[in-house]
Amino acid sequence: MIDRAPARSRHIQLRWIMAAFAAYVSVSLIVRWLRDPLFLGVGPDGWPTPSFGELTYLLYMTCLPVVLWVLLAYAGACRLPDGWGMRTTMMLVFLFVLTVVELDNIWYGMSGHHATWREMRLFLSENWTLHYGIRASDERGFLLRMAKHFFRLLLVFLGASLISRWESGQRCFSAPFRRALVVVLVLVVGDALLTGYQVSRGGDQWQAVADANPFRIHSLDHLSLRLFTYGSDHDTDLEAASRAFSEAAGDAMHRSPDTSGIFSNAATLPREKYDVVVVTIEGLNARLSDSTTMPFWTQLAARSTSLRNHYSTGNVTEYGVLGLLYGAPPNFYRGTGALPWRHELPSAKQPPQPGSPYISEFARRGYHTRLISWELSSWAQLGIYLRNFNEPAFETTDDWKLIPELARELQDPGPHLAYMHYNGTHFPYAHAQSYSQFRPEVPSDFDYASGQLRSQAAEITNRYRNCLLELDAWLRSLTGVIDLEHTIVVLTGDHGEEFFEHARLGHASTLAAPQIRTDALIYVPGQPSRVVDVVTSHADLMPTLMDYLGWPQPVPPFGHSLAGDVKGGSAIVAMGNRPNPPSRWAAIAGDAKGIFVDGPGDTLHLVRLLDTTDHPLSYITQPARWQPALEAAAHLQLRLLTASRPVRAVSAAGVAP
């Protein structure tokens, strides 16, 4: 007769180890990783304070998925060899899980969504310090957290091994495994149904707790929510708006593009060859760039055209920069999916990119065109799209070195177009010590993964406002080397930057207003100051320059000139999708914002109806207010359908071939 006692003893010990690990992870979820949605989001400015029963259930729904995954892990661990090989393998697996969750927690705290394998692979292939602002203190903090996890896991293993030797400890897990797994699966499905029901009736905290938990099966939550909202007024409203969009898309297919030269409202400037300086500013928050943080900007705005309702063409740098320079949504951007592991793809292997037709038009008219910027070409393969500047680029990691280089460039004979990108306002918001007016601020080595983002929101915002002070001083110095009597200056953010307006920090995570709206101004010598309150876009800026300079448009413009009277406008904004091309878009006009996703055959599908403050907005009650936004999306769809035709500079007649 075979003695099964050793195998049973091993399984009992294994069950205790798994149970102890589940308890450790659950406690970590509650007191660290999910602390914000469980506790910090409650109060006068957040969710209603839950009752004791509701809070108990929120904690239960936090821990339940952990139990499911631990049971599944137990089934796999039972097949491992006995002894230290099993223990070592489990320790490595547990450390790997905790490492992934820690990294995901950092990503989620900044972006509001869980990291994907695609994003992790891309992150590991790039320069962390240059592109993500990761400091040595961040790396040390992460290693310290993982070291703590390691020693705590050792205690978990030791304690579980000791308890499993007690007779009473062995009886705790006598239930058959399959029965336990079935019970937990039923509980998980029931929890998903209850959560979907609560969320469908406005349970925002339930939604936040579910979304933030990396162990939940989010597809099951989404299916449950869909089950309880199917056939609702929201569905009916969305279907009516989708039909209206289909009609607008059909009309766009039969409408001839505008290939006219100068816009009908062209400004009447002397036909002098003005120098042109275009500056994009990393992550410029429109709410915080006020007269207190940026007094010089305010003074310059009083002499310029101020765009008070301005949108980037994306919520990431590559989309914002390319949308401005190309005068169009970045549907032509091919992504970085071909990026080999930790290597930049040689330019020769990329599909040919002719560059911005607007930059080519400046060169054709005798301008020196040059990139004078923070190190932009290496970011997201932007250099492939910026190759048609006719002067060698100057790039540096010190923004202050850009100003003397611009001064030297403008001293050379002939007209100049200089494009500059300022990076000093990038996360983690480092600034010189002399710009520390707003206090208290988080220290320069603040751990943004500490789980204290929401509680330190004011201090983090103050650090950014001090960055704006340094930016303002930089702009004052910049204009000091420019002859403002003979230079057109365009200043804007590459995109917005969120500071907890929707419980997030940074950009690249959503199409919410703080991440896509930004300030913009256009200074033109001799032109009176004015304020434009209608929706404007990065795609409008290059067509506007053509108009001010009195030149025909080099290609049929996607945007609209802002040189004359502006009565209405629209914006198309792409959501970051690295390393792939953009596939999610916002179409904005007036106070309406439709969210679209790419579908089969380069078609767009409407998925959300919002106002510009990101609250739900009905279509059926006022369909006329949606027409401009739907027409803008139809224009984008037409562009997607014809994207296989390369964008080329105009012929001598000034008309796109």
Image: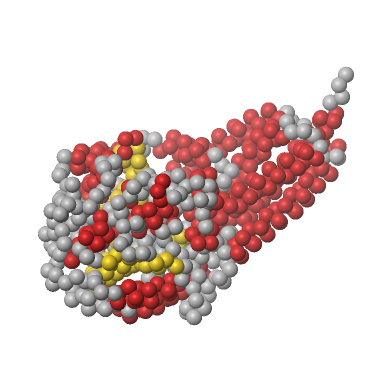
Q: Residue at x 63, y 55 (%)?
A: 31
Q: Is residue 390 left or right of residue 176?
A: left
Image coords of residue 639 (percent x, y)? 26, 44
Q: 205 or 271: nearer the eye?
A: 271
Q: Residue furthest top?
A: 1
When the figure is inspected, residue 204 is found, relative to residue 7, above or below; the finding is: below
State the quadrant of the N terminus: top right
Q: In this picture, is 410 found above or below 234?
A: below
Res. 49 visible in picture:
no
Specify whether 203 is left or right of 56.
Answer: left
Residue pictured at 80% horizontal, 47% vertical: 159
Q: Is 173 left or right of 647, judged from the image as shown? A: right
In which quadrant of the rendered view does residue 5 lie?
top right
Query: Image quarter for residue 93?
Result: top right
Q: How many marks?
A: 0
Residue 523: x, y in percent? 25, 72
Of 16 and 331, the residue lying toward us: 331
Identify the image's colour scheme: rainbow, by chain, secondary structure or one colour: secondary structure
Q: Is residue 218 visible?
A: yes
Q: Nearer the viewer, residue 90 or 120?
A: 120
Q: Residue at x 16, y 72 (%)?
A: 272
Q: Residue at x 56, y 70 (%)?
A: 444
- Residue 536's spot in the image, x, y percent? 26, 59
Residue 615 percent location from the top left of the image: 36, 53
